[in-house]
Image (cartoon, helix red, strand yellow):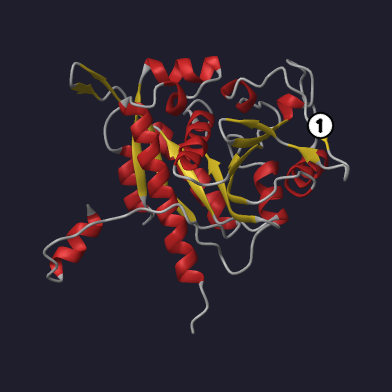
Amino acid sequence: GDVRSAIHKIGAAEIEVHFGAQVRAPQNLPLPGIKHIVAIASGKGGVGKSTVAANLAIALTLEGAHVGLLDADIYGPSQAQMFGSQGSKLMVDDQKRMVPLERYGIKLISMANIVPPGQAMVWRGPILHGTIKQFLQEVAWGDLDYLIIDLPPGTGDVQLSLSQLTRLSGGLIVTTPQDVARIDAERAVDMFKRVQVNILGVIENMSYFEQNGHKTYIFGQGGGRKMAEQYKTAFLGEIPIALSVREGGDSGVPVVVGAPQSPEAEAFRQAARNLAGQLSMHSYLLLPMA
């Protein structure tokens, strides 16, 4: 719609828009074979960050991209549950690199596929740093358009290690509409700014509940959009509260796979397109001038 409006203004009468799956890469790749690394953050737990990460990753594959997902929440990994891979163990190849699991077209690495279920990870910062380094540099990721990193809540050791170990294409903030969640999400924005990571946009989760065509804004309305405007970044989309989203996470079949025609799945797919557009635009702006 934005493309059509812009072209109409310069006098075009008929417009046909085609979308492609070719992903523009930056001049220098952050890791060998990986074009973009995107960290998904929230200032607090309970806003559905891991659900958003899982569904965005799959939505990007549905657009034709090659995608990996790194569950960097070492203390509370949840992506194995999201993808139904709790019982699978990671293997190593002949170069002693970890081989990601593959689910729904995603290459997946999670601590949950290394340690026994329910085992607490009582680790200090240096061990966390070494683990994140292994997950980035000692994994057979192959060629990826996007590596999505599901960060733990808050602004601690994992976030700092990630910024030191690789160059992020950008950070994405997940919030819910109410002020108390938005205030916490602002800490994640500040964290990215302190380590000089661009903010790619804001996704508002649990935006509303829809029944019989009527939307109820349980947690208030517009908080995510206001936050994006405040920080002069993109508002990538609103994800509604729906039983299918919760069921998908619990069953290991994310909603974009389990209920692909649902409004929730379409919201995730549109948010993924918006994210890809922001990354493409960012890469274009960083290209050297001729």
Q: What percent of the width, then of the height, locates residue 178?
A: 35, 31
Question: Which quarter of the figure has residue 157?
Answer: top right
The residue that disc 1 covers is 91
The residue carrying pointer 1 sits among few (fewer than 14), some (14 to 19) or many (20 or more) residues within 10 Å by Cα, namely: few
Q: Up-down: is 22 above or below 156?
A: below
Q: Is residue 37 left or right of residue 114?
A: left
In this view of the protein, which residue sits in the foreground, 195 or 109?
Answer: 109
Q: Residue furthest bottom?
A: 290
Q: Up-down: is 141 above or below 208?
A: below
Question: Which quarter of the figure has residue 33?
Answer: bottom right
| x 25%, y 59%: residue | 3
Q: Is residue 35 left or right of residue 225?
A: right
**Tag 1: amino acid:** Met
| x 57%, y 23%: residue | 82
Is residue 177 in view from this perspective? no
> Label 1's element?
strand
